Amino acid sequence: MTDSGDIRYSRHIALPTIGAQGQQKLEAAVVLVVGLGGLGSTASLYLANSGVGQLLINDFDRVDATNLPRQILFDPDDLGRHKAEAAAAQLKRWNPDIQIIPLPEHLERRALKKTVADCTVVLDCTDNFASRWLINEVCAATHKPLVSGAAIRFEGQLAVFRHEPGQGPCYRCLYAEADENFEDCAGQGILAPVAGTVGCMMATEAIKLIVGLPSKFEGRLWVYDAMTGASRSVKIPRRKDCPVCGPPA
């Protein structure tokens, strides 16, 4: 770490639970953020500014006007641009000392698995079950930690899955095909700061995983209600019939 890095990250280094060694772990980390909406744009901004050495940001969508209230990396000049490329340019401005790799395409199973295999932590910031199930399955197969977040209307959710061999639960234990619906931000609406709240939490949990700090959300679902300001977390039971982490038949 350079002298300028010591100054920039001095507030991290001052934390006894992180220190210089923890900051070096962040510098050596490779983090994949899938989805650059309200969750991913917020999480990636804090991860970049926290000194994560290599940040892979994936989204095949383009910026439109409805994104601007909650997707804080983008401004009106970015309208029509690929989100991954626009986000990479912004993040590089915020922290030119780290490596930002934009992935402006839909990652199919093989490409996703190859990308995840080299990562320290994966953040699922997508907004549909098909993507979430695939990301969870690939992370489980490669034994990579996954931070999963969601936000809609006035509610946010977050869960952490370590995907250690032979252990569960995983995201598929939480939601199965029967839970799939068509609710999304476009159809249901969302309060912009709720997405930012969950995105900040996701960045925090990713950093804790990287530096080796324990998490209260491992194998648990954290639910936040912005209307009341209340939050709670519940244990996610491991499904015996889970096709991803369930015991072999």
Image (cartoon, rainbow, N blue to C red):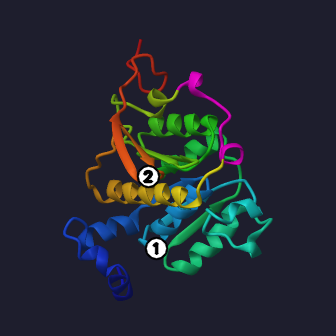
Which mark is drawn over residue 121?
Answer: 2
Q: Which residues make up the magenta segment?
A: 176-188
Q: Nearer the viewer, mark 2 or mark 1?
A: 1
Outermost residue, front side = 228
Outermost residue, right side = 80
Q: Are marks 2 and 1 in contact (CB under 8 Å)?
A: no
The residue shown at (49%, 74%) is 98
Q: Nearer the viewer, residue 234 or 44?
A: 234
Mark 2–mark 1 Cα distance, whole angstroms, equals 17 Å
From the image, tell me which residue sits under label 1. 49
Determine whether the residue tagged by mark 1 lies in a helix, strand or loop. helix
Residue 60 painted magenta: no
Which mark is drawn over residue 101?
Answer: none
Q: Amino acid at mark 1?
A: Asn
Side of 141 relative to 235 (left or right): right
The x and y percentages for residue 176 are 54, 25
Determine whether the residue tagged by mark 2 lies in a helix, strand or loop. strand
